[in-house]
Image (tube, helix red, strand yellow):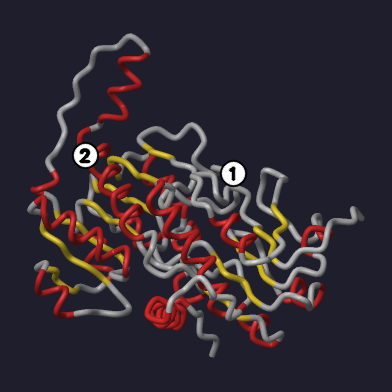
């Protein structure tokens, strides 16, 4: 095992501070020692045990934190995650080991929503196909469709789903939605009709999925539902791969039941299976939140969550500290 210098904080995400947010300097100026992930990949604690040794606080990405991890590294007190999903963290084991978990709440919402809109328009207007045609010497204009004439089905009307709704409303689209939580005031403002998931699937021109991955939502977009999608529909997934039966979705695309799909999330990091060589598919490498503005906001929030939790907040005046402590309560993952 490599012996590393003692550190208070592990920055587990290898892309941290790439847009020069100044967060590493911020931590060091407060007297905290920082250990970085310099592997260029997602950490695996079983293969990178030396990196986690004696760490108290973790600024986390998509790494796996299961019961074995918490038992192996009892020094860990806080995991402050950059992002909103916690499907890679065993929350029961975290609670058992008195580890506090924080997320960056609604920070990625606008960036993810904008990616959804970009994919909607690209799929409707076939711009991605025509770009490839031109590069291969084919001048082949393809007639498309307009977003204003589409029925948009939003699966999951949480923070990201709401941002998508605001944007498609501006295009004049008809909006229907399925959500486990529901804000009627918001729905009334943007003329959103609440429907059952089965009805949404059958009647939407575009289905966009915004659900967390948990036992309740695993394969919620099932093979049966996919078979009931409207002919020529478009499906977009920027949430988690596990909420959709991807093999059934692939089959529907190959059989041309759907006009196209856009996928930003996969079962494994850097593994795009089962989408290799499938036409009418837009693939992106989990970039939903990857804008300069959003990465900056997420990194700042993840660090602030950690600092306020640990009361290392000399840099915050009274008013800002009170606001941050309120934000901290909102970002804390409550474990039942």
Alpha-carbon neighbours of circle 2 within 10 Å: few (<14), some, or many (≥20)? many
Q: What residue sits right under mark 1 in the picture?
A: 271
Q: Secondary structure at mark 2?
A: helix
Task: Where is residue 93? Give x, y as percent.
Answer: 68, 81
Say which quarter of the image contains residue 141: top left
Task: Where is residue 117? Give x, y as percent.
Answer: 25, 48
Q: Residue furthest bottom?
A: 336
Q: Is residue 313 left or right of residue 72?
A: left
Q: Nearer the viewer, residue 276 or 51?
A: 51
Task: Where is residue 235? Give x, y as percent.
Answer: 32, 50
Q: Give the residue drawn at x 20%, y 61%.
A: 165
Q: Quadrant of the C terminus?
A: bottom right
Q: Give the residue drawn at x 70%, y 53%.
A: 36
Q: Nearer the viewer, residue 176 or 60?
A: 60
Task: Where is residue 206? Give x, y as percent.
Answer: 23, 52
Q: Nearer the viewer, residue 291 or 247?
A: 291
The answer to whether 181 is drawn above or below residue 163 in the figure is: below
The answer to whether 157 is drawn above or below residue 254 in the figure is: below
Disc nearer the start of the sequence (1/2): 2
The circle on residue 326 is: none
Q: Residue furthest top?
A: 137
Q: What residue sits right under mark 2 in the picture?
A: 124
Q: Give the residue drawn at x 69%, y 62%.
A: 10
């Amino acid at each position: 095992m490599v012996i590393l210098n003692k550190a208070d904080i592990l920055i587990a995400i290898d892309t941290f501070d790439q847009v020069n947010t100044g967060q590493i300097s911020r931590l060091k100026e407060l007297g905290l020692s920082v250990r970085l992930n310099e592997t260029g990949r997602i950490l695996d604690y079983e293969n990178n045990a030396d990196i986690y040794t004696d760490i108290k606080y973790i600024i986390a990405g998509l790494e796996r934190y299961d019961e074995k991890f918490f038992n192996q590294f009892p020094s860990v007190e806080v995991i402050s995650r950059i992002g909103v999903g916690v499907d890679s963290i065993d929350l029961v084991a975290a609670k058992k080991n008195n580890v506090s978990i924080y997320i960056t709440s609604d920070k990625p919402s606008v960036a993810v929503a904008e990616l959804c809109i970009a994919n909607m328009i690209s799929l409707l207007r076939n711009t991605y196909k025509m770009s490839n045609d031109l590069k291969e010497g084919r001048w082949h204009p393809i007639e498309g469709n307009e977003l204003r004439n589409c029925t948009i089905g939003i699966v999951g009307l949480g923070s990201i789903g709401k941002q998508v709704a605001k944007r498609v409303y501006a295009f004049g689209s008809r909006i229907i939605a399925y959500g486990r939580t529901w804000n009627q005031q918001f729905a009334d403002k943007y003329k959103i009709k609440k429907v059952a998931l089965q009805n949404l699937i059958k009647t939407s021109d575009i289905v966009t999925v915004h659900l967390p991955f948990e036992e309740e939502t695993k394969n919620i977009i099932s093979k049966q539902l996919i078979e009931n999608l409207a002919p020529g529909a478009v499906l977009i997934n920027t949430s988690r791969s596990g909420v959709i039966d991807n093999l059934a979705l692939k089959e529907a695309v190959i059989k041309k039941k759907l006009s196209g799909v856009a996928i930003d999330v996969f079962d494994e990091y850097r593994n795009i299976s089962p989408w290799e060589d499938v036409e009418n598919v837009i693939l992106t490498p989990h970039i939903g939140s990857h804008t300069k503005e959003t990465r900056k906001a997420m990194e700042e929030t993840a660090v602030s969550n950690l600092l306020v939790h640990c009361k290392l907040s000399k840099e915050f005046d009274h008013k800002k500290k009170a606001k941050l402590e309120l934000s901290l309560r909102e970002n804390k993952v409550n474990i039942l």
